[in-house]
Image: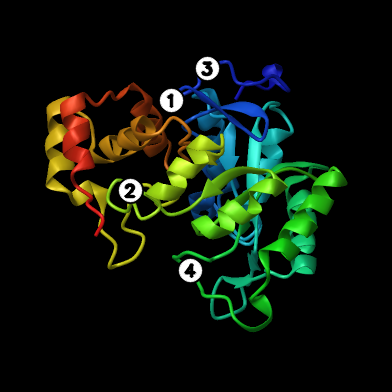
Amino acid sequence: MDRSAQNKPAKQPAPGGLYTLAGQPVARIGYGAMQLRSWGDAPEKATAVLERAIELGVNHIDTAEFYGNRFVNRVIAQLIKHVDGIVVATKVGANPNPQGPHPLTLAQRPEQIRATVEANLESLGVAHLPLVNLRRLDAGPGVIPEADQLVNVDDQLAELIALRTAGKIGAIGLSGVNLDVLKHAVPAGIACVQNAYSLVSREFEDMLAFCLAHNIAWVPFFPLGGAAPHWPKVTTEQAVIDIAQRLQVTPSQVGLAWLLQHSPNTLLIPGTASIEHLEENMATATVVLDDAAVQVLDDIYRPA
């Protein structure tokens, strides 16, 4: 990236159009940074992917302190020193645990949430986090909280509101929640919801509708399914493959395009460690599904 353009927002057209997140218009196709952890021994390659994303119009980057045991945050920190206008969304509710049996450990208690916010501030090199998502695990996938990690959402929100009042965070989001928890939390001011959702996994359709009605951004993770061995994959559905061949695009692009067209409050954060794959994801913005294709894709999933 040309450093002579330091501290200027990206000028490329916003891929997918715009939607407001944390009080700022963001491109509807953003970037999920988790897979950058694969470049842990080559930070310059991780930086190249991020720089290309910004060049393509991305101004919403999703990250977490536990991605690569802080590696990803530190790479992002170097980028945002030079580019303004980027909404960096991070998460609380878990912490890195590189020496343990699993790479992360739950951190649901209020004091742990505050400590994780402070850790994100430090690793991102900022004094303010635009958006913090509370990863609760009321809905899967993920480890089921138990013992002292079973925490009332009111206690967690109170801590996040205090941090927001103190200016350390901007907006509050929720992740891994059910509709009851979301409805209960709305008075706190919820900017977005991150739940597992895709063309073939639409258990949260009622929550998506609720978010749309309340101007809450819907940010699906695992947008192509296949997150676990028993989960269906969008790209193996014959209807998806057939439509992709007719449009001369990839099955992944069909799955992502369906999400964009399905609801205007949907923000995508597809992740990759490859510039080529990144460019393919961004090109989804040019894929238009006609009414016939949408009907075929809608019919793939029929809830019981």
Q: Amino acid at mark 4?
A: Gly
Query: Which one is earlier in the sequence, the residue at label 3 or at label 4?
Result: 3
Contact between marks 1 and 4 (CB within 8 A): the answer is: no
Say if 104 sits above or below 194 in the image: below
* Image quarter of the C terminus: bottom left
Q: CA distance from mark 2 to mark 4?
A: 17 Å
Q: CA distance from mark 1 to mark 4?
A: 29 Å
* Disc 2: which residue: 224
x, y percentage for residue 184? 62, 55
Q: Nearer the viewer, mark 3 or mark 4?
A: 4
Contact between marks 3 and 2 (CB within 8 A): the answer is: no
Does the image show residue 226? yes
Q: Nearer the viewer, mark 3 or mark 1?
A: 1
Q: Secondary structure at mark 3?
A: loop
x, y percentage for residue 29? 46, 32
* Disc 1: which residue: 16
Query: Which one is earlier in the sequence, the residue at label 1 or at label 2?
Result: 1
* Disc 4: which residue: 142
Crowding near the residue tagged with mark 4, few <14, some 14–19, many ≥20 C-alpha atoms within 10 Å: few
Report whether 81 appears left or right of 302: right
Contact between marks 3 and 1 (CB within 8 A): the answer is: no
x, y percentage for residue 233? 26, 54
